[in-house]
Image: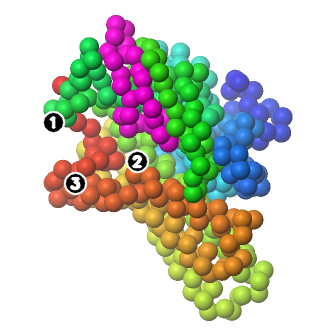
């Protein structure tokens, strides 16, 4: 499907591709009620139905990371997070897939321009896959032979391209990485047609994300489709930084928490609980946590943006400013789960039945908190950075090892 032929919200209408952040955000907000209505269906399918994927494509969410000199809208990380937040307000699984799939334009900054232009002839293509090295990339003339088994391929059921992390081998022998890293790794991109999806995604929550396992078996990957986050092609800019793909993730948690808060308040009003002390205190307490958490996410992103738009890099942030980025992400996920849990308790037995969206939001926030960005490893990483120690997950801070 061409950019000019996008279908609007699955209704068969064609519209021009959105040109800027305001248009994309408006379309995302308009789609959110449709996603809410389709939530049970999405969960039962354990993946996004094709027409929902096309509705997301029509919002422009998958193109929002492409630069203006590509003809893309080049949304800032702040604007991207707002879009993901709006879609997740409708359905967390759809928001999660939109967040993952929108990385296509971000990955383009790590590829040679001519190569990326060939790979992405339109700006609305979806990329999915697991970045952590789980496969084996054997160096061969012209590129690599890739084989492996990966988990958590969110959106792989509807992806156009699949990106996978793999350890490098030469003549069957592991290749060393940068200094201090005994085994080097690399990211490789292959067409979805070269991937076998394994239907493993039976899970507590985010069922509709279709985050299945997948395998790639002895597929040749040209060297120009392989990259590392340490090697930015064409020079760094605000969206060409090693951790850029993590920045809009809190939008899923924030959108889900906001949806739960609005639902609980509306339910309480309908039930005539306006003067119920417990309801008043619980809602206000959750709103306070939400406001502080959302401010923390967007405050950290704003400061990052202020520095990067000047042509500086993440190294120009103070240690506190740099640590605030992964810490605010983790806090957003943990706080969203806490808010949904408290509201679930507040509404008591009315929340336990599957027609209640709180039941799904409880399971969705529980599942999304198992992602590495919501784990204690992030605390260690940020704390080590503040103390001048060794972070266990430096990429969360945008730190990549020096290359040989």
* Viewport quadrant of the N terminus: top right
- The reply to whether discs 3 and 2 touch (Cβ–Cβ < 8 Å) is no
Q: Secondary structure at mark 1?
A: loop
Q: Are marks 2 and 1 in contact (CB under 8 Å)?
A: no
Which label sits in the foreground, 1 or 3? 1
User: CA–CA distance between discs 2 and 1?
Assistant: 31 Å
Dot 2 crowding, Cα within 10 Å, few <14, some 14–19, many 20+: some
Distance Cα–Cα, label 3 vs label 2: 20 Å
Residue 340 horizontal/vertical position (percent): 57, 70
Indicate which disc, 2 or 1, sits on the residue closer to the N terminus.
Answer: 1
What element does badge 2 sit on? helix
Q: Residue at x 60, y 38 (%)?
A: 199
Boundaries of the magenta span: 129-155
Please tell me which of labels 1 and 3 falls first in the chain: 1
Residue 147 within the magenta-colored segment of the rendering: yes
Q: Dot 2 corresponds to which residue?
A: 305
Q: Nearer the viewer, mark 2 or mark 1?
A: 1
Vertical side of 250 occupied by 64: above or below: above
Q: Nearer the viewer, mark 3 or mark 2?
A: 3
Say which residue label 1 marks: 180
Principal SS element in the magenta part? strand
- Give 60 or 19, whichever is nearer the viewer: 60
Residue linked to disc 3: 385
Task: Report the quarter where the C terminus lies.
Answer: top left
Q: Is residue 57 magenta?
A: no
The answer to whether residue 278 is seen in the rendering is yes
Q: Residues within 10 Å of mark 1 (few under 14, many from 20)?
A: few
Q: Position of residue 209 (x, y in %)?
A: 60, 46
Relative to 153, say whether 350 is above or below.
below
């Amino acid at each position: 499907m061409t950019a000019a032929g996008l279908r609007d919200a699955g209704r068969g209408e064609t519209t021009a591709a959105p040109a800027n952040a305001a248009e994309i955000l408006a379309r995302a907000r308009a789609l959110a009620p449709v996603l809410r209505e389709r939530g049970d269906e999405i969960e039962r399918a354990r993946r996004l139905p094709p027409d929902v994927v096309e509705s997301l494509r029509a919002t422009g969410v998958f193109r929002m990371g492409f630069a203006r000199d590509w003809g893309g809208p080049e949304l800032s990380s702040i604007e991207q997070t707002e879009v993901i937040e709006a879609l997740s307000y409708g359905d967390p699984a759809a928001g999660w897939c939109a967040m993952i799939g929108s990385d296509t334009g971000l990955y383009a900054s790590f590829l040679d321009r001519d190569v990326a232009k060939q790979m992405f002839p339109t700006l609305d293509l979806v990329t999915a896959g697991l970045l952590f090295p789980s496969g084996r990339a054997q160096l061969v003339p012209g590129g690599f032979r890739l084989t492996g088994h990966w988990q958590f391929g969110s959106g792989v059921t509807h992806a156009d391209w699949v990106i996978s992390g793999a350890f490098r081998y030469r003549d069957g022998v592991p290749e060393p990485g940068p200094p201090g890293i005994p085994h080097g790794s690399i990211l490789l991109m292959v067409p979805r047609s070269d991937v076998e999806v394994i239907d493993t995604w039976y899970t507590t929550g985010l069922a509709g994300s279709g985050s299945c396992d997948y395998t790639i078996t002895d597929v040749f990957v040209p060297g120009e489709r392989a990259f590392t986050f340490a090697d930015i092609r064409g020079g760094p800019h605000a969206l060409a930084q090693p951790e850029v793909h993590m920045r809009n993730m809190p939008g899923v948690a924030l959108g889900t928490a906001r949806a739960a808060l609005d639902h609980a308040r509306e339910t309480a009003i309908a039930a005539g609980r306006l003067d119920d002390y417990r309801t008043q205190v619980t809602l206000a307490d959750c709103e306070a946590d939400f406001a502080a958490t959302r401010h923390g996410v967007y405050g950290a992103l704003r400061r990052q943006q202020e520095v990067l738009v000047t042509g500086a890099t993440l190294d120009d942030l103070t240690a506190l400013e740099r640590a605030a980025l992964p810490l605010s992400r983790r806090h957003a996920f943990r706080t969203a789960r806490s808010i949904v849990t408290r509201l679930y308790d507040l509404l008591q037995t009315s929340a336990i039945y599957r027609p209640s969206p709180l039941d799904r939001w409880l399971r969705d926030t529980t599942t999304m908190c198992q992602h590495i960005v919501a784990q204690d490893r992030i605390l260690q990483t940020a704390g080590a950075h503040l103390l001048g120690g060794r972070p266990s997950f430096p990429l969360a801070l945008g730190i990549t090892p020096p290359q040989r």
